Image: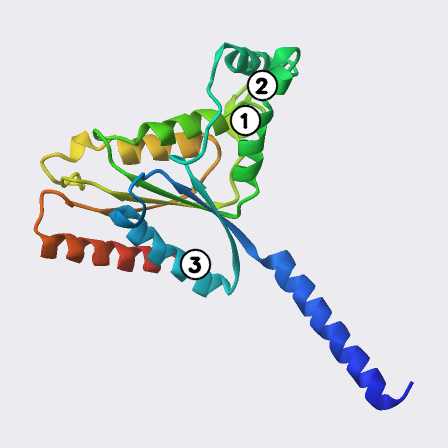
């Protein structure tokens, strides 16, 4: 083979190896959206800045967006709950529970396939919107994201980072008069720690409603800046 042709073959092989390497190392990011407001969402403005920073740092990412208000989440009905009790007692799924759990397992697989999780959620009534609670009830399952042992439960969903981006109408920050009303951060920290997360990063913009337009914009920009620093 002529030297020029061999050089071209070698060059193409190098590019192919590089492409395979980039595809292998590309981080998968699951963006869980718990706001129904779309483009009007202040929470999503902040998470957009966070995702852009993640993309810049990682070079390339595979972004999977799960809109909880658009997704038809499986209900935890009597059959599915019955399946959960099978798993909690150490049994395999059987009977009607096998088919009933297919959607649940699909959501768990989608969650665990991600290297980075971003949750965008407003505060509703001091906690999370009902769709986010519903989603967590689906993915927090024995044998999948945690397991019971003689020394207690052990999380199985660790080795990945999770960002919690939230906005609040009032000021519930540490040291504020209403700090004890914040049930959002403590709940999400507890439940994701339970299933194995050790790297949980919170970004909150507050107050939103109890503020002027200029004040809201300043808080949003401040939150975006913090989010970028946490990446």
Looking at the image, residue 155 lies above or below residue 203: above
Looking at the image, residue 51 lies above or below residue 110: below
Q: Is residue 27 left or right of residue 118?
A: right
Looking at the image, residue 55 lies above or below residue 87: below
Residue at 58% across, 32% down: 106
Q: Which residue was labeled with disc 1?
A: 104
Q: Are marks 1 and 2 in contact (CB under 8 Å)?
A: yes
Label 3 crowd bin: few (<14), some (14–19), many (20+), radius 10 Å:
many
Q: Are marks 1 and 3 in contact (CB under 8 Å)?
A: no
Depth order, front residue of 107/70: 70
> Quadrant of the rendered structure where residue 124 is?
top left
Depth order, front residue of 152/133: 133
- Label 3 sits on a secondary structure element that is helix
Disc nearer the start of the sequence (2/3): 3
Q: Which residue was labeled with disc 2?
A: 100
Residue 201 is situated, as x and y percent measured from the top left of the image, at 36, 46
Q: Is residue 221 left or right of residue 209?
A: right
Locate the C terminus and report the quarter of the image it occupies: bottom left
Res. 107 visible in picture: yes
Per the model, the C-alpha gap separating discs 1 and 3 is 28 Å
Per the model, the C-alpha gap separating discs 2 and 3 is 36 Å
Residue at 66% across, 63% down: 21
Q: Residue furthest right?
A: 1
Looking at the image, residue 166 lies above or below residue 154: below
Residue 40 is situated, as x and y percent measured from the top left of the image, at 26, 48
Q: Nearer the viewer, mark 1 or mark 3?
A: 1
Per the model, the C-alpha gap separating discs 1 and 2 is 8 Å
Q: Which residue was labeled with disc 3?
A: 54
Locate the N terminus and report the quarter of the image it occupies: bottom right
């Amino acid at each position: 083979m002529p030297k020029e042709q061999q050089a071209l073959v070698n060059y193409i092989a190098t590019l192919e190896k590089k492409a395979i390497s980039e595809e292998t190392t590309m981080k998968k990011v699951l963006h869980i959206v718990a706001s129904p407001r779309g483009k009007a969402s202040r929470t999503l403005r902040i998470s957009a800045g966070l995702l852009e920073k993640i993309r810049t740092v990682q070079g390339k990412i595979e972004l999977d967006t799960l809109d909880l208000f658009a997704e038809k989440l499986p209900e935890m009905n009597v059959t599915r709950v019955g399946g959960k009790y099978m798993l909690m007692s150490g049994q395999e799924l059987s009977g009607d529970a096998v088919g009933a759990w297919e959607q649940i397992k699909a959501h768990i697989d989608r969650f665990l396939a991600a290297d980075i999780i971003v949750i965008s959620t407003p505060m509703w009534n001091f906690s999370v919107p009902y769709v986010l609670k519903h989603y967590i009830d689906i993915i927090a399952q024995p044998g999948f994201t945690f397991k019971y042992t003689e020394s207690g439960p052990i999380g199985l969903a660790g080795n990945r980072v999770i960002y919690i981006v939230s906005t609040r109408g009032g000021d519930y920050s540490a040291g504020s008069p209403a700090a004890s009303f914040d049930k959002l951060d403590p709940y999400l920290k507890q439940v994701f720690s339970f299933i194995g997360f050790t790297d949980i990063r919170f970004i909150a913009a507050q107050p939103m409603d109890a503020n002027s337009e200029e004040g809201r914009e300043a808080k949003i920009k401040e939150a975006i800046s913090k989010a970028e620093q946490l990446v």
